[in-house]
Image (cartoon, grey):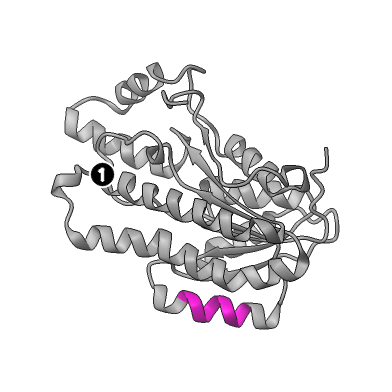
């Protein structure tokens, strides 16, 4: 199976922690040159130092804040004018704040839509010409199982994930003929700071301890535990590889079996 990414350049968003960081490391292990994208320069520099370089890669980072969409386009285009090569784009950013959908204000939806769908659109429009020229492209969106099965208490997130899914399927249909695939990876309960925040919110709302909240969540996971960022990153890495050339327009839960739909 061809998992070799030597000579390929991967842009990994939200890559200073959690699934994004694990994905950057995994792609580097397969030989890719990594460009980290995130908004905290100190953390970017720290992750940059951790990336494997055994295959002679050149890793970089781009300081970018996806909540400021007016800056995303100019920053990515400026970067590509200096380093005009990209084969892989991993769209990944922090999830919207929790809460019931009926209580959400319009600004929450607008902000989340901009950070996820609009930023992904801007980045894809910027990198697609380079992928088309190379005859190879992989776009992977890290979303949530809320795309398939809405999660109670994450109303805004569920809504935006659904929009992201339809955006990705449309992009898969349009770009497939150029050797570019577009897929979604849907994490379930994963040991990240995001899960910790959600569990704290549930703990405060129910007067239960964090341990009790976690125990209840794990009851609904067939493998009996939370997923690790590294396990999710492995699936993303496969989708980015030459071996996954015919996997296009799909949404793959990485949730230990929690999602009840097929």
Residue 16: quadrant of the picture:
bottom right
Residue 141 belongs to the span the image colors magenta: no
Q: In this view, does 59 lie to the left or right of 214?
A: right
Q: In which quarter of the image is the N terminus?
A: top right
What residue did someone put label 1 on? 155
Residue 246: quadrant of the picture:
top right
Taking the image as drawn, is residue 39 in sight?
A: no
Q: In this view, does 70 lie above or below 152?
A: below
Taking the image as drawn, is residue 185 in sight?
A: yes
Q: Is mark 1 on a helix, strand or loop?
A: helix
Residue 202: quadrant of the picture:
top left
Q: Is residue 73 above or below residue 39?
A: below
Magenta range: 72-79
Expressed as whole percent of the image width and height from the top left, the position of residue 260 reads 41, 23
Expressed as whole percent of the image width and height from the top left, the position of residue 170 reads 50, 55
Q: In this view, does 187 lie above or below 221?
A: below
């Amino acid at each position: 199976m061809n998992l070799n990414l030597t000579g390929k350049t991967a842009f990994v968003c939200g890559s200073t922690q959690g699934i994004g960081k694990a994905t950057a490391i995994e792609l580097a292990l397969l030989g890719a040159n990594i460009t980290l994208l995130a908004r905290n320069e100190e953390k970017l520099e720290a992750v940059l130092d951790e990336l494997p370089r055994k295959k002679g890669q050149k890793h970089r980072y781009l300081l970018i804040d996806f909540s400021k969409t007016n800056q995303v386009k100019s920053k990515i285009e400026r970067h590509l004018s200096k380093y005009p090569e990209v084969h892989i784009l991993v769209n990944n950013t922090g999830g919207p704040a929790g809460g019931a959908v009926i209580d959400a204000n319009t600004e929450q939806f607008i902000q989340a839509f901009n950070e996820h769908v609009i930023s992904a659109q801007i980045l894809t429009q910027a990198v697609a010409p380079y992928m088309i020229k190379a005859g190879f492209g992989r776009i992977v969106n890290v979303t949530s199982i809320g795309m398939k099965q809405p999660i109670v208490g994450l109303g805004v997130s569920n809504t935006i994930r659904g929009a992201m899914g339809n955006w990705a399927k449309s992009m898969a249909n349009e770009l497939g003929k150029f050797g570019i695939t577009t897929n979604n990876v849907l994490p379930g309960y994963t040991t990240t700071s995001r899960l910790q925040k959600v569990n704290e919110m549930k703990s405060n709302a129910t007067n239960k301890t964090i341990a009790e909240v976690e125990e209840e969540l794990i009851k609904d996971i067939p493998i009996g535990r939370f997923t690790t960022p590294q396990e999710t990153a492995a699936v993303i890495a496969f989708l980015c590889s030459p071996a996954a050339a015919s996997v296009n327009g799909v949404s793959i839960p990485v949730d230990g079996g929690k999602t009840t739909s097929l």
